[in-house]
Amino acid sequence: MCKSKNRIISEEMLNRYQKMLAGEEKSKNTINQYLRDLECFRQYTNGKKVDKWVVIRYKEKLIENYKTRSVNAKLSALNGFFKKMGWYECIVKLVKMQKETFRANSKVLTKREYERLLEAAEHMGKGRLCLVIETLCSMGLRVSELRFITVEAVRCGFAEVTLKGKSRIALMPEELRKVLENYIREQKIESGCVFVTRTGKPLDRSNIWRDMKALSEKAGIMPSKIFPHNLRHLFACVYYAEEKNANHLADIMGHSSLDTTRIYTQVSMEEELAALNKMGLVGMSGFARGNAVGICQGYN
C-alpha cells in the first residue's frame, strides 16, 4: 500500500498493475486499454502527486472532450488502479447516465441490409467472407470466438466457447452446419479451426473488419454499420423479437448481466418512433379535432 506522499504514478507501478490484471486473467485487449487510460492520466499529472482534486479536475476535462460512456470507461480504469494501490481517497464517482432506449440509426444493421451484405460478398467472389458473416450472425458470436468453430464443432453441431474465464455452448443452426460441412469438404480441412489465413492461423478481427468494410459500396450500406460486432447485435435483436426471452438470450450470448443483454436488444430510433405512433394516445383532444379555440378559451 502506498502512502499519500508517494502518490506519484511510476513505470514500476504500471508494470506491477499489469501483472495484477494478468493474474486476474483479464484479456490482453482489456489490459492494454487500462494501461493506455492510465498512461493518459499519468501524462496529465506530469509527475505531480495524485490526490482527489487532481482526479476530479481530470474527470471534468474528460467530460468536456469525450462521450459519457468513454468517460466512465476511463474513470473505471483509474479507480481500479487506485484500489490496487490502496489510494482509496482518490476514487471518484462515475458520471450518471440515463440508459438509452434505442440505438442511433447510423449504427443499426437491419436484416435486409444483412442480406445485401451477403449478396455483395457473393457478387465480389468472397465466398469465405460470406460464410464467416453467416456464422457470426446466425450463432451470435463475438469475432474473437470464431476460432472455436472447428471441424470437430461442426460435426457435433455446437461449439464450446471459452472466453474471459467463462464457458458456454453455442448451438449451430442446422442449415449453417450443412453449409460448413460442404466448405470443409471442398477445402479438405481435416481438423482444427475452419476459418484460417494462408499461414494456418485463425482469422482475426483485423482480417474480417477490413474485408467487411470493402463490401460497403457494393451493398449500398453506410460504412458505420459494417463491423463484425454488429452481426452479434443483429442476432440479439432478431432472437428477442422472435422469443421475447431476455434471460435465455443472455445465456446464449454469454452475458453475466441482463443490463448487457439490454444493450444488444435496443431497436433503432425509427422503430422506437413507429411503436410510439401505434399507441394511439394522440388524436382525442380538441386540438387534434380542430377545436383548439374552444379549449384555449377555457383557460381565460
Image: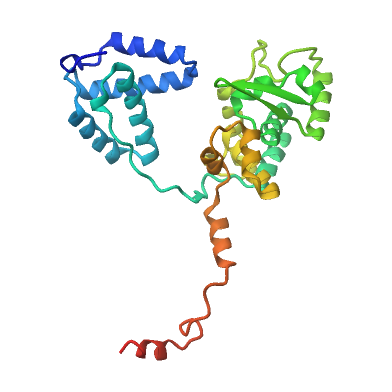
| Residue 293 x/y as whole percent | 40, 90
Position of the N terminus, as image quadrant, is top left
Say which of 198 and 74 sits in front. Answer: 74
Counting every numbered tag in the picture gives 0
| Residue 194 x/y as whole percent | 73, 19
Q: Which colour style is shown? A: rainbow
Left or right of residue 147: residue 290: left
Position of the C terminus, as image quadrant, is bottom left
Res 250 → quadrant: top right
Left or right of residue 262: residue 298: left
Q: Relative to 49, is 178 above or below?
A: below
Which residue is painted at 57% across and 72% down in the image? 280
The answer to whether any part of residue 300 appears in the image is yes
Say which of 156 and 255 sits in front. Answer: 255
Which residue is painted at 29% across and 39% down in the image? 63
Res 122 → quadrant: top right
| Residue 103 x/y as whole percent | 51, 48
Q: Relative to 138, is 90 above or below?
A: above
Which residue is painted at 57% across and 68% down in the image? 279
Q: Relative to 282, is 206 above or below?
A: above
The answer to whether any part of residue 183 appears in the image is no
| Residue 115 x/y as whole percent | 70, 43
